[in-house]
Amino acid sequence: MCTGAVLGSLALSLLAGPARAAGGPPEARPAPPPAPAPTHVRGTAPTPAPAPDTAGLDALLRTALGQGAPGAAARIDDHRTSYDGPATVHRLAEGVADRADAEAMDTADRFRIGSVTKTFSAVVLLQLVAEGRLRLDTSVDHYLPGLLPDARITVRHVLGHRSGLYDYTEDLFARTVPGFEAVRTKVFTLRELVARSLRHPLTGTPGAAYSYSNTNYVVAGLLIEKLTGEPVRTAYEDRIIGPLKLADTFYVHPGTAIPGRHAHGYLTPDEPGGALVDATEQTVSWAQSAGALISSARDLNTFLSALLGGRLLPAAQLAEMRRWFPAGTGQGYGLGLRRRDLSCGISVYGHTGAVQGFYTYAFTGENGLRSYTAVVNTSNNGAVQATMLRTLEPVFCGKRARVR
């Protein structure tokens, strides 16, 4: 099922000196590159982006179905040149949200957003930086004494995946389906998850190379709870969900259900040809502040537009978020935010999410004028994952994109 473009309105979805190792000299950390300059001053009209190629996008969604995804949906909220006028909203959906009753996938469906949660967590901590309650280049050990094995690990290292902390999920999900079933209804504390990571030595020197690890954002959750005195759920609700009126965004941990209308998520077994496993209901306690939020395409577009548009963070903290370190070919990672460079010469900003049963791609352009979220209701499927990455090209580069 694919519907055409429709008109609608967009409902509008850390700073100290260098850390020191205990009893040692100041940490030697390469200075991060400067944040990119904005392409235009708020209130002036930027050069319009090429119109999205919705036919090319829909073709890729259908390709994902052919590769094993039961359903796929995408939404583009496009303000083109101004926040003040109405947004053009493109909604596309293919396949089914529930294999049991063949209910069609819909762009209004809620789903588990996985690691897109990390961007929410980073925003909360950067807001605390702006309030003077947290410093990016201070040791995590200053705020959470004794938690980590190396006092050189700073808040900035954690948020930028440069701490060297081992990713405990490598152990939990060494076997995909058995690993999932072992934790589906389990409830962990955040400190228990950190302890699982610390069974292993650091994978690198703190502050050196980017190395993605869910452990970093479990530490982020502990920082949020220590500094606010409230659960991470309250921080998300009070600082992001409430102010942006994100009606489809929830942190239900340790609850297992997705509230309201939602897509079912299907986990692909490691064995070729194995039956998909309905992984919709789970605590996601193995992730929490690293990946347990539920949302919708509309809410994620609202969130990213607000973030890149400067409505969630002061300019100084947004610039910190956008200090990029190399994170693979054609991409950089800042603080809870990923940059991807496209074939047409532009870059987009956001995050990807993988949680049992769902892949999410949520990105926005410079200043948040065009935001895009897509979801497929399967995971552990590399072909589908690669196809969904390719959808960024027709959305942001238009018909001139080379869709391969």
Image (tube, rainbow, N blue to C red):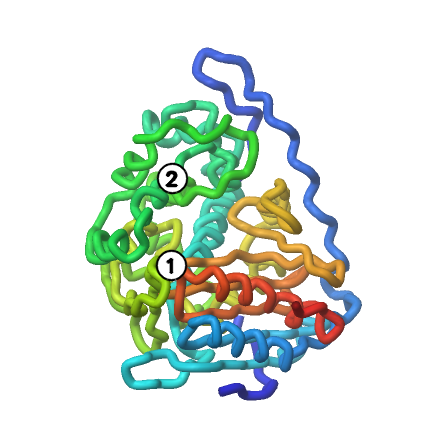
In the rendered image, residue 295, in percent from the top left (x then y), is placed at 41, 67
Q: Which residue is mark 1?
A: 355
In the rendered image, residue 281, in percent from the top left (x then y), is placed at 26, 66
Where 16 sits versus 371, above or below?
A: above
Q: In 3D space, how far apart are the residues under numbered discs 2 and 1 (Cα atoms)?
A: 19 Å
State the mark number for residue 219: 2
- Which of pointers 2 and 1 lies earlier in the amino acid sequence? 2
Q: Residue at x 35, y 58 (%)?
A: 270
In the rendered image, residue 200, in percent from the top left (x then y), is placed at 34, 30
Residue 228 in sight from this viewpoint? no
Q: Residue at x 62, y 66 (%)?
A: 392
Q: Residue at x 30, y 51 (%)?
A: 175
Where 287 sits versus 53, above or below?
A: above
Which residue of the protein is positioned furthest toward the top in this rendering? Answer: 23
Amino acid beneath label 1: Val
Where 221 sits versus 73, above or below?
A: above
In the rendered image, residue 267, in percent from the top left (x then y), is placed at 34, 64
Q: Nearer the viewer, residue 73 or 45?
A: 73
Element on which disc 1 rests: strand
